[in-house]
Amino acid sequence: MNRDSPTLEGAPDEALVQEMEGSPLPEGVPSFDPNDPVENAVIRRLVGNWHRRATVKREEPDLDELFDTSRADYPEQILPFHDHPTYLALAPEKRSELLSWAWIAYNRHTVMAEQKVANPAFALVMEGEYPGLSGEALNLSLAQAMVDEQYHTLMHLNASAVTRRRRGHALPDAALPLSHTARVHQELRDRAGGRAEKSLTTLAFATVSEISINAYLDLLAEDTAIQPINSTTAKLHNRDEYCHASISHVLAEMVYHHLDAPQRRYFLDMLMEGLDAFVANDYSTWHRIVDLAGIDGGHEMLADCQAEAGRKRLVRDYTGLHKLVEQMGVADQVDFDCRSLGPRPLRPWPRDVGLARKGAARLGEHRGGGAGLLAAAPPGPRPPARGAAVLRPVRPGGGVVRRPAPRPRVLVPRAAGHRCAPGVASGRPVRITAHETSLTQRHLWRSAREAIPMTRTVIVEAEQDGVSGYGEASCFMADHYNSGLDRMHADLRRTAPLLATLDVDAPGGADAVWRRLAAALPASPFVLAALDCAIHDLRARLHGVPLWKSLGLDRPQGLRSSYSIGLDTPEAMLGKLRERPGWQAYKVKLADPGDLGILRELRRETDAPFLIDGNCGWEPARLVPALPDLHALGVRLIEQPYPRDAWEQARALKELSPIPVIADESITSPADLDACTAAFHGINVKPMKSGGITPALALLRAARERGLITMLGCMPESAAGVSATAHLGGLVDHLDVDVVDLLAVDTGQGLTLDATGHVDLPERPGSGYLPDPTAHGWYVHQVPAEHVHPVRRSAGGPAQPTASPAPSQDDHPGTRHLAVLRRGRAVGAASLYAEDPPDGYAVPGARPGRGRRLHGVATLEEVRGTGAGTSLLRTALTLAALDGADTVWAQVPDAALGFCRKHGFDTLGRPLDLPDTGRHHLVHRSTR
């Protein structure tokens, strides 16, 4: 321990210490050990006083008795849009509903702060994760705090429940996204370099949460004008948090003084990241709420608020954290004003702001803020790339000429140019549809990070006037990119009201559409990319031109892709190269850059350059010594050797490497471009991870302006996605779009690769992708009615929902039929009818004409237990939402009731006795 380490005496609030004076320790707790700076009088008093101050020890109030229906559920004045014309124009009952939603979100965010940040940090302390913290008294204090947090969770859940009961709104917690604080915390933990950094991230966020939560709770606790139950809940919770703030203050101070210099810097950075996240208005949640509440112009209203600095923060009292950094002696080392900022004056809204949107959100803010996207360069002839490594056959003594990058210049946002004639589209709304695929590759795909036996994707189809455009989102690195199938479907359902208003020929074109989508999908780049690509593709097809021309680009000429060799045994990797001889370059996945044996074996087979990819898995100690040998073996590019946020190591490598190094995982949005310019020689742009064609195009142009090497790549995807990507190929130095050659199955025809990697774009409008309904890559796909009838007749089984033969609605124009496909054969089926629930069954929240009946859900025995039924149901719910439905309902037998409840359906009314089929239940759920 450092000599100047602080003692714990005097750290908590003085009034709290005075209250705890003389409180005896519970029986069995050891007396204070003066040799242990943690087991001191403060901690001892906290333990002994728990029974006197903890809310968990108090009698609960009667929530329903406290509820006053005449009062608002939330202080209107702290809504970020409380004075916006769109909000002020709402009917009183709609404004009341938004205030109820604000209270539900407030409770949910409070619960997440407890469950996902505070308690995990306390648990890590008790497990001995941090230096300088130990002792029974400390552990008892933390255990008591964790009990408090669990009880606070119960308090807020109860408070939300009574609001739903008394207001009569569904207001489901599960419909809201992860809170901003929890989401940023998880993202930073995912990016952390190792266990120590992950733990320090959690401790820093917990410190901010526990020290600053009083200011958050005070927003409601002292407000006498709102619902008494709500202010009382906040007040009771607040009592405990004043003590927890003292504990967290002590823990942070002690840990900090046991850290080395780099760890201290990291911990301070995480404190500021935590504070920035904790005090922010959670606009992702608000975007979801305005969808759920059906607020016309709601997204534009929120975008107006996001664009004004004075409306970015909800909590403005940072005195607790300011006191901490002052006592730690580091107030001059942080770049955030931790003192109370006080209310900022807000500019009055322009009179027409609710009608004509002002100050559109900048490109790049969809990943959580940061610098706006550097603008696209004007269309025209492609300038020569600077700093590029020209791929050519390797010769002894050959090398790469590296030119210094020009100084970056600041660019301003602008829309991409278009060279096609306007005014072709009819103005009818765009109809969005979703399909699921199941893609297998010719060889099991492995990298230093993972093995991928099969990839599931969602293909988005945007249709207008019988013309369809396509985009794709992969279920890949789901935790990092929020790209799990359930999450992606939920995002499509959540944004369905917005998607129903899209106009591909609106002023500003596809770029304006992207801005609207990005505001609604701030943490879902893959879904955003699929929608953006589909809109670009549709627009080009409606104009009858290829995508490259619609984007204002020159025709791509002479495109050639590298060929990827996944990690495997040396024999298998050698076999993969022999299967594809004569390609211009080979991209080789390596687990260890110091293991040169496989490269030597591959070099005997080809003189083509090698690009090697570490997928974030290498260590400097293994890579740096191997650089001369790698260069001698013809390695001409190194891709993402270190973890995403290992910026210091990346900058050091850039300075000493004879081989250019490019970023992949480190460049996920335009906000990363400045850091990547300093740390890498180039970037690998993938439209799916960037959020679509729109930001990918601007990223490539901005990178070339900075003299960076450019690569254009793809995720595990089918021809539906990568065909559009290849239209940007004329802007890059390296093209890596061989995924269609790696696939064993696909979904249709698009770009093609010849035997040596030459890329041909289809001579068709748009991306040129043409879906093939017989292709074996489809998993859940729309089919004609006659394709579902055999499955209904064959399914049987006691656990199947009603699977009767074809009813009259099967041929109705509004009916959708879905099939689960296995090698092109239907093995599961479901149908959606445009039909409201029967008379006498009032589904909460359902509007007339907005119901969809789910009928004939059936799977064959061979796929039961594989998730086929879940995929059918998930896709059916998404299609219903995209068609404008509020509710999906069905009549199901007893045996299917458990399956339906598992997927969020509720029963309504008493069971029905249907002729010839027995007892059934009417079940329903919201499409949101």
Image (cartoon, rainbow, N blue to C red):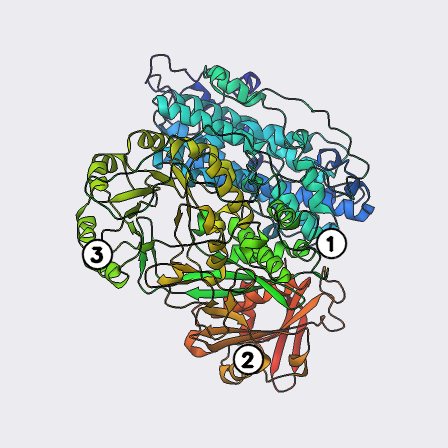
- Residue 125 shows up from this direction: no
How many C-alpha atoms fall within 10 Å of the one at disc 3: few (<14), some, or many (≥20)?
few
In the depicted view, which residue is nearer to us: 361 or 306? Answer: 361
- The label shown at residue 733 is none
User: Looking at the rendered structure, which numbered label has been put on residue 569?
Assistant: 3
Coordinates of residue 815 in the picture (x, y in percent): 65, 74
Q: Nearer the viewer, residue 114 or 765?
A: 765
Residue 54 percent across, percent down from the top left = 55, 32
C-alpha span from label 2 to label 1? 39 Å
**Crowding at mark 2 (Cα within 10 Å: few <14, some 14-19, many 20+):** many
Q: Are marks 1 and 3 in contact (CB under 8 Å)?
A: no
Residue named by callout 1: 168
**Which residue type does callout 3 highlight?**
Thr
Describe the element under mark 3 as helix, strand or loop.
Answer: loop
- Give the CA separation, mark 3 to mark 2: 44 Å
Please give the name of the residue rendered at 80% of the width and 39% of the height, measured from the top-left corner.
Answer: 352
Q: Position of residue 299 (x, y in %)?
A: 69, 46
Image height check: is 523 above or below 496? above
- Under circle 2, the secondary element is helix
Q: Secondary structure at mark 1?
A: loop
First in sequence: mark 2 or mark 1?
1
Residue 152 as seen in the image, left or right of residue 703: right
The residue nearer to you, when weighing 245 against 384, is 384
- Residue on which the image places disc 2: 788
First of labels 1, 3 by sequence position: 1
